[in-house]
Image (cartoon, grey):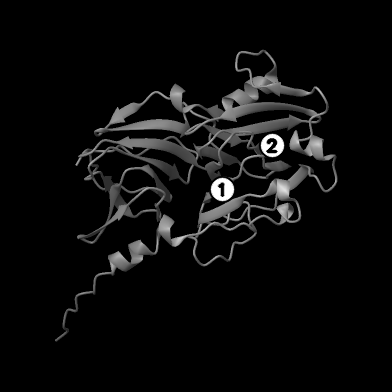
Amino acid sequence: MAIAVQAKPLDLTSEMRTFIGRHTDKSFDWDAFPGSRGFPELERAQMRYIGAGGSPKADDPNTLKPGQFTLSLVHQPVGKYAACHSHEVVEHFLVLEGVLTVGWAWGDEVIEACLGPKDMVLNQVSRPHGFRNDGIEPVLMSISVGSGMPKPPVYICHPRDSDALAARRFGAGPGKTRALDPDSDDPRQREFARHIVRYAGRRPVWEAGFARLVYIGEGGAPPGQYRMDMIHLPKGAAVRGYARLVEDAYFVLEGCITVGWEESGHTVEERLGPKDVILTPASRVHYFRNDGVADAEFMLLAGTARAEDVRFQAA
């Protein structure tokens, strides 16, 4: 007579922990970008969470394997800049601390915009751009690109082959730098403005007891390979388990959240604090909850450009 054997449940706890990046387990890499070597004015440091982003260090064993997007932090000291370059994929900068000057270039004409905390720019495919810290404190920002393995950047104006002052201006000729003007009739100004998201200008969409601020997607910057929302989760709020056909990630900005995974009747949970991340694979049922003492805020990235199709339900 055949004997029924019950399959051993997956060790969800161990699996879940392999998809979490803890801020306290990481360190900044000051040699992440080969194009900056030998140029002190280009110094900046990268902390990798998901993939390598614009760095060639894709073999870093301490980062999570990327799908449709990467995620890293970049620290830029006062007075430093990144030379004007372009990518074959979209790339966003979300400022967390300090004030960042971002420039988009059209030949030797450049439009610049200043971004404060929780402001974002989504750089278009092939649009030459650079960034600079003209402030009085270091800039910390989150950067994502729309590919797990992006190609190396194409430099448009680098100090190794350009005048140093021109490189700092992202290739702008004398008198050819303009400030961003969203009300301008100049199509370049309008194009740039469509890809900048101001935190102060976001209007929350409330559902299931939490607020969603759209950054990349309908109502925000035009989506490329992924979408991004900022989630404001009041203390005590929670959602039921849901699944996507694509991966998604939570990157905590403020407070703490509890994240749960479900499978075959089993549930495991982990707590995430500021600058921790979890990447949840496609089709995995998961949820989030705030059982902390203060409201929480986190970025939610989803690996698709399609409109949000998850209907969250309060738990």
Vertical comparison of 34 with 255: above or below: below
**Circle on res. 265:** none
Which residue does the numbered mark 1 point to in the structure image? 74
In the displayed structure image, the side of residue 24 where residue 160 appears, left or right: right
Q: Residue furthest left?
A: 1
Q: Which residue type carries mark 1?
A: Val
Tell us which disc is closer to us: 2 or 1: 1
- Residue 120, horizontal then vertical, whole percent: 53, 33
Q: Amino acid at mark 2?
A: His
In the image, taking residue 61 as reference, residue 259 lies left or right, namely: left
Give the percent coordinates (x, y) of residue 269: 26, 57
Total marks drawn? Answer: 2
Q: Residue at x 55, y 65 (%)?
A: 60
**Where is 3 relative to 90, above or below?**
below
Instruction: Name, please, the residue furthest toward the bottom.
Output: 1
Q: Residue at x 40, y 52 (%)?
A: 276
